[in-house]
Amino acid sequence: MPTGPKGQKRPADLIGSAVRVMRIATGEEADQVQVDGKSAAAKELGSKGGKKRAENMTPERRAEIARRAAEKRWRK
């Protein structure tokens, strides 16, 4: 059975998916949404971290990091 992006089980066929949506909509079945445990404030601050880090780096350092990342991608 296929799984969703967070590991939830999903029906493999179109009709099975439609039946599941119908059951969730009518309340026969609970929608199994997994909470990642992070607060909204933590998510907001986390998204700012990369930008702030890039602002504090020199252009040479950013280029070095990008070069290493490209080498690792092409190595695969």
Image (tube, helix red, strand yellow):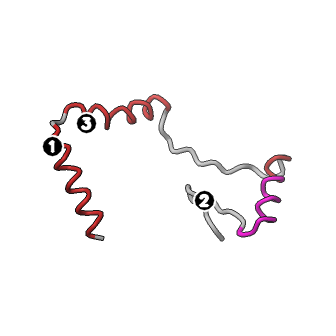
61 with respect to 40 (left or right): left
Q: Report helix, strand or loop for mark 1.
A: helix
Compare marks 2 and 1 and give the one earlier in the sequence: 2
Q: Residue at x 17, y 39 (%)?
A: 59
**Foreground disc of the pair 2, 1:** 1
- Please tell me how crowded label 1 is: few (under 14), some (14-19), or many (20+) other residues with Cα within 10 Å: few
What amino acid is at disc 1?
Arg
Q: Which residues are magenta?
A: 12-22
What amino acid is at disc 2?
Gly
Compare marks 2 and 3 and give the one earlier in the sequence: 2
Separation of marks 2 and 3 at Cα, in angstroms: 33 Å
Locate residue 18: give its quadrant. Answer: bottom right
Which numbered disc covers residue 54? 3
Residue tagged 2: 4
What amino acid is at disc 3?
Ala
Depicted 24 relative to depicted 73: above or below: above
Q: Tell me the chief SS of the magenta region.
A: helix
Compare marks 1 and 3 and give the one earlier in the sequence: 3
What percent of the width, then of the height, locates residue 19? 82, 59
Residue tagged 1: 61
